[in-house]
Amino acid sequence: MRKIIYILIGFLVIFSFFGCQKREKKELVIWHWMADRQKAFEELAKKYEEEHGLKVRFELFFPPEAYSQKIQAAAGAGDLPDLFGILGEKKIFASFIKGGYVEDLTPYLEENNGEWKKRFIKISLEFNEFKKNNPYGVKEGIYAIPIDMMSIQFLVNKKMLKEIGGEIPSTWQEFIALARKTKERGKWGFICGWGESWFIYCLVTNYAFNIMGKEKFFSTLKGEVPYTDPDWIRVFKLFKELKEADILFPGIVTLSNKEAEQFFAQEKALFSFNGSWGINTYFQINPDLEYDTLPPPPVNEKFPVSIWAGAGSSFVVNKNSPLKEEAIDFLKWLTQKEQQIFLIQHTHNLPAIKGCKDKLDKNLVKFLKNLECATHPRIWPINENPRVVEAINTGVQKILVGEAKPEEVAEEIEEVKREVVKEK
Amino acid sequence: MRYSLKEEIKNFSFVLPALSIFFFFYIIPFIYTFFLALHQGSGLSSLKFVGLENFKRILSPQGTAIIVIFIGGILVVFSFWFKKKIKNRFLKIVKTASIIMGIICIIYGIKELGEVLSSGWVIDKEWWASVGRSFYITLWALTFQNFLAFALALCVDKAIRTGYIYRAIFFLLPVISEIIFGLLIRSLLLPYPGVLAHFLKKLGLENLVRDWLNDPRYALTTLAFVHCWRGFGWGFVILLAGLQTIPQTLYEAARIDGAGAWQRFIKITLPLMLPVIVLVVILTILGTVQVIGLPMVLTRGGPAGKTTVSVLRIYNDLKNYHAGYASCEGIVLGIILITLSFTLIKISNRLKKV
């Protein structure tokens, strides 16, 4: 028996020794969720090792939900890699910064007269920036480096548009009329992955900017304007108009983004509302698909319509990493023109840096249009409470399935908003 | 028999690995959940202590106060009930601590209740609606799923030679990943291309065609039906195993005494199967209330939140980094499930005596 105990203790000591042993060989570890980019990342890692002698390992965790939980757990356990990405709202990003897991990259970006900072398209970097006196209580600075960009716009199937003798719509009414015409021909007018409810919020905010202007929109977020305001009811009525026009793809309220992309690629609908990431799916399903982008057709001309755009994927540097400097050097290298071109050509995403337009696929260039009206919740001075956002998404779905009127939905949302304000 | 300290340590060392795993992966997360439930925040940066605020949002301030008084009462009553039985010094300390805790709970609860009694009872309606949806699916599972499982188990029990084949066939669905099964069913039920709708039309059953996944009137029932269809195999296997333990001699004796098939079922099968049925019922409740994979892939909680069940709601809260509130929801759901399970065990014990 004594022998067994000695053996057990022996094993315990050996395992403890190995467990406590430090990484002897220098290796940069990067966690991400981008399944479509793993191969390209691996090639870049190989190239970096050849050029700089530092091994880089990209570890993929998919799907994104699982990835989010993985980094959340790793942060709690103090086991984050040297570089990683953070998914979700700016509030979540702020939690990681306040938790002491993310390095402030501003000094590195400002080095050498801001050489690194000047490379980027403005909005892609703004996406990861915390301004002075931000509502999250984060110290002013830029905390992540974008490796690509995205924009979410209306898409139109050019072939189908030609068949009905239409032109790119410039107003909401024209859009509805064209979609109706398509429906009469046995196809659908509009498709979107509204099963993923954030798409609804995206379109709601696009039209809220157009109908009431951004000042009034932000006033609502601050609780100064109620959701029962006529302008907000007008926004919700747009969804009623979509339903009543009978142009929506069947089952749109539970459709995932991938499903919506597939059906649009199969030319089942004239219009879609999707992000630049969709072009991969379109190309794989139907290489001959001819489409163009347009901002959401405006309801009025009083205020400009907006689109959501910004950094697609970004990497942050682990503040506690022993390879912090090496990680920053790697990011500088990754955002050089040569690597960016390699990435966009392999992954069909928009580049995060300037000067790559001539190297882009013709469909990708379309998503670089309309960026003058780009916005995103991550760059807003204030964000809506997630419970209110949930109420908006659920309410709009109710309108779409004919369960509630826009006025009733506005009332429900306002009730949630009042509760949230009261709790605060 | 008393062991020396050396022997005690030696014996303890054998269970130490299992205890360590249990402690680190079960006990600590369990306690941490209670800790999180009293805080607000993502769990990443500093947590803000909010006391019972999360519970108040779920149960309303009045409900929380009443439950606190109830828990305090239980602590005090149980502590006094154990009065004569306790000799161990450690347990005596626990008993005293329980009494003090209980009294604190009662005083705090009464104080809170006095303050909030006049105001309206505001509860998190969405959370309770999601719990209601979970129990709606559970009701379907307890009836349709378990009746189907029992009926098939009874049929297969007689077919000894082919029993293994049926067992394998019926058990196939629960073995398939919930996600894969959900995606397959979704592709059949989608209104476009509408595979099931197409077949129904071909069969002349056009009036049965519905938008099963997107119509708020049918979405939850569709989800319940799909869940039952996938899950009946579990119940089937357990019930069949139970049926095969009943000695055939009992049936033969009953048959000689002139008992018919119905009488044999009521007088022999059902009473002897009672513990197994209770087990299946408990497993069904626990399994169904915790369903998450199917609603995630079938409807994503839609349309208009009509299929957002309780665990999906907890998941969404966690995903949105509301760890404190999600923990609180988890605790409330856990208490409901534990209460239900104990009630069922008690009922089963009573029935066994009868």
Image (tube, coloured by chain):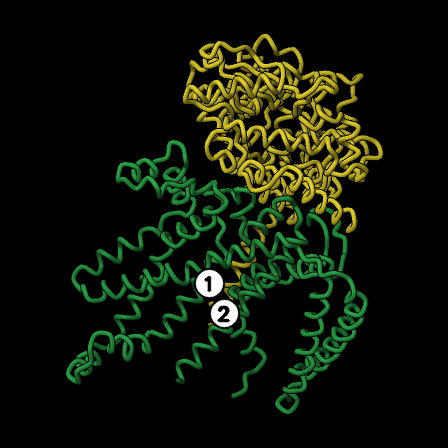
Chain colours: A yellow, B green
Q: Amino acid at mark 2?
A: Ser
Q: Residue furthest bottom?
A: B84
Report whether B142 appears left or right of B107: left
Q: Residue B160: which quarter of the image? A: bottom left
Q: CA distance from mark 1 to mark 2?
A: 8 Å
Question: Horizontal and vertical percent for residue A366?
Answer: 58, 14
Q: Residue at x 32, y 77 (%)?
A: B272
**Residue A285 visible at all:** no
B243 and B9: which one is in front?
A: B243
Residue A45: quadrant of the picture: top right
- Tell me the SS state at disc 2: helix
Residue A210 seen in this snapshot: yes
Residue marked by disc 2:
B341
| Residue type at numbered disc 1 | Ile
Disc ID at residue B285: 1
Q: Check contact, mark 1 vs mark 2: CB within 8 A.
A: yes
Tell if the residue under mark 1 belongs to the same chain as the one under mark 2.
yes
| Chain under callout 2 | B
- Tell me which chain the residue with mark 1 is part of: B
Is B101 or B199 nearer to us in this picture? B199
